[in-house]
Amino acid sequence: MSTVETSPAAAPAVGRADLAIRVGAIVFAVGTLAVLVTLTPFLIGAHPLPRAVYLLSMLMPLGFALAMGGLFAAARGQRRKLPA
C-alpha cells in the first residue's frame, strides 16, 4: 500500500515521461548497434559503408537526450506529487 496520493494532473505527465524513457532507450540501442556496424569495416579492413549507416549512428546521442529528458520530467513529476 502506498500512502502517497497521486493527483490526476500529475499522472499523464509521468506516463509521458516513462514513454520518453522507453523510446529513448530503444533509439539509443539502435544507435549503438549502428555505431558498432559502422566501426566493423574499419577493424576488418573492408570498404566503408554507405553514408546512411553513418547517419544512423546519430541516433545514439538522440536517444540518450530523449531518455535523459524523460528522466528529468519524471523526477519533476515525482517532486510535484510529494506533500510539502
Image (spheres, rainbow, N blue to C red):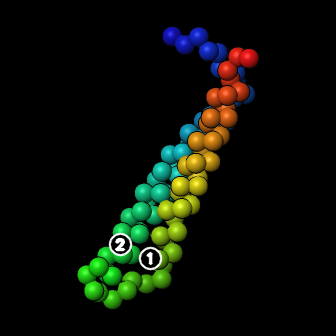
Q: Is residue 64 left or right of residue 4?
A: left
Q: Image point 59% across, 10% down: which residue?
A: 3
Which sits in the foreground, 83 or 2?
83
Please say if the residues under marks 1 and 2 sit with CB atoms less than 8 Å apart: yes
Percent coordinates x, y for residue 24 in the rendering: 53, 52
Q: Which label sits on residue 79?
A: none
Q: Is residue 55 above or below residue 10?
A: below
Any part of residue 16 in sight:
no
Residue type for callout 1: Val
Under circle 1, the secondary element is helix
Name the residue beneath numbered marker 1: 53
Q: Is residue 2 above or below residue 68?
A: above
Q: Which label sits on residue 37?
A: 2
Disc 1: CA contacts within 10 A as few (<14), some (14-19) or many (>=20)? some
For marks 1 and 2, give the CA distance: 8 Å
Q: Is residue 48 left or right of residue 59?
A: left
Percent coordinates x, y for residue 25 in the rendering: 48, 51
Disc 2: CA contacts within 10 A as few (<14), some (14-19) or many (>=20)? some
Lower sequence index among marks 1 and 2 = 2
Under circle 2, the secondary element is helix
Which quadrant would residue 84 be assigned to in this image? Answer: top right
Q: Image point 41% across, 69% down: which residue?
A: 35
Q: Is residue 38 left or right of residue 64?
A: left
Which quadrant would residue 81 be assigned to in this image? Answer: top right
Q: Is residue 73 above or below residue 26?
A: above
Percent coordinates x, y for residue 40 in the rendering: 31, 76
Q: Image point 37% across, 86% down: which residue?
A: 48
Residue type for callout 2: Val
Q: Is residue 34 left or right of residue 19?
A: left
